[in-house]
Image (cartoon, coloured by chain):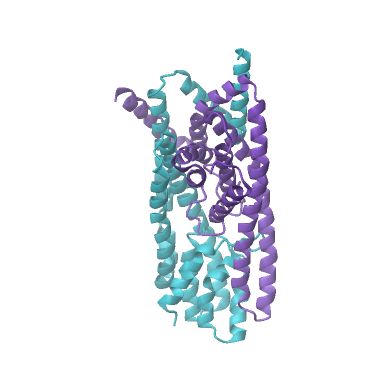
Amino acid sequence: MITKLDLLRVFLRSFFIQSLWNLEGLQNAGFLYTISPCLDRLYPGKDDRKMAYIRHLEPFNTHPYAANLIIGYTISKEEKGVEKDMISSLKKGMFGPLAVMGDAIFWAGIMPLFAFIASMMAIYGYVWGGVIFLLLYNLIHIPTRFLGLHLGYRLGDNIVEVVKRFRFKTLSSYLQMAQVIVCGLALGSIAGSEKPLPFYPFLIGILVFGLRRGMRPTLLFFIIVMICIAVSYLFGY
Amino acid sequence: MDHLGLKNILIISLVGGLLNLDTRAVAQVMVSRPIITAPIVGFLIGGWDGIRIGCMIGAILELIWINVLPMGASIPANASLSSTLGVAVALLTKGEMRILIVLAIAISILFSFIFTSIDLKNREFNSLLVRMASCLIHKGRFWAIDAMNLASLLITFLLGIISLFFSLSVSIWLLRGLVDWMPSYMMIGLSIAYYILPILGIGAAVNAFLVSKRLIPYFGVAILWGIIFTSTV
């Protein structure tokens, strides 16, 4: 009943899942917006459709890329005519864990890693760092959304098993390792190269110490600027 | 684009507002991150020279805000509009580039608070729109969800444009005044600060990445490797 075109429309709409983000239902309206082509297909009758729409306006929040998995799964369940309360509890059961996974892999993993590398390249004048960042990042992002939708739709109940068995903690810790390694390399190469100032590591030590004490980097920026101005004043410029 | 006219500020606000949509409303392809937005705006204003300055400002802002992302239900600081503002302000003011970059970053950070509270207002608007949609759907008007979604996009876009327009006007005026008045010790001080910025950025990144003691060995080895590799090559 659900056609490939319906799923394509859902896939395209899924990019807007956070447009109507609100404090009460979070991604609820976005979820409805994304899934509505399929609801229209499955419930041609006005009353059924109204119930379906209202049903899917319940609070929903997960990682935007991972949401497609739940959306595909919901579509397959709606198509099979599963009990409505069941669909609701399946959604609720899945969005928490997927949010944690998505946050750990994307927001705290891949994104900062690639962004750091692109930033280092930019600082050293390699202007195309940003382009590479966008390309590589979205080569992971877009297929995640696409596969999420189709796997969620086709795999049915197996999806819960797959999600449970997905070793995201291992992936997450590899990403963290990659992050600190890249950071270390950057620090090391600054300390070892251009200006062999011995006070660079000292400076970094002070910085990390300040940051560890809970100081925000933005505040630290202003403190450093103030110190520089003060030092230059004291030296009588 | 070196002449400061209404038309140019409008164009910058439009592009900045468009890029800002990517933070939450559309797709999240990361085109709204400072490291991407700043060079784009830099290119728009200053061509190939503008890109290089955009890269520097974008890189530092990206590093300072490297862990500012929408985790769960939190509302992160708006890095996109802030970086657009910073680059525009640096490129539309005449002066020594290093000083302007430091000042631009300062302005970005200061105005980020305003942009974030506008984000909050935006989400409140969304609550209203969703309530309206729910009401209409109860009456059987199913087009409401599409309409409200479009309305929300337009509102986010417009809020971005308006806030950029005003921030740009105010901060360019402020910055020009500041650069004229600035005593020489301040100029020297800011030039020194410019060289410390990459270190601050890496420090912020280290703080965000080093989340457990387990990672310290990898970090340490990588630093040593970096030092050895660059001092012998």
Tell me residue A236's x, y (percent).
Answer: 62, 12
What is the residue that sits farthest to the top in this orientation?
A: A236
Q: Quadrant of residue A50?
A: bottom right
Q: Is residue B16 above or below residue A45?
A: above
- Work out which residue is located at the far left of the displayed protein and give it: B233
Residue in the image at 69% along x and 59% along y: B124
Q: Is residue A174 above or below residue A167?
A: above
Q: Nearer the viewer, residue B154 or B7?
A: B7
Q: Is residue A1 left or right of residue B173?
A: left
Q: Is residue A191 above or below residue B92?
A: above
Q: Which chain is purple?
A: B
Is any atom of residue A229 visible in this view? yes
Percent position of residue A3, x then y: 42, 79
What residue sits 65% from the left and 55% below the top? B159
Residue closer to the observer: A89 or B230? B230
Which quarter of the rendering shows the C terminus of chain B? Answer: top left
Asked if one can make out residue A170 in the rendered structure from this viewpoint, the answer is: no
User: Horizontal and vertical percent for residue A100?
Assistant: 51, 54
Quarter assignment of residue A144? bottom left
Front-lying residue, B124 or A158: B124
Task: Give the left or right position of residue B229, taking residue A144 as reference.
Answer: left
Is the residue A95 above or below the residue A195 in the image? below
- Residue B180, given in percent of the width and then of the height, sits at 65, 28
Query: In the rendering, what colour is chain A?
Result: cyan
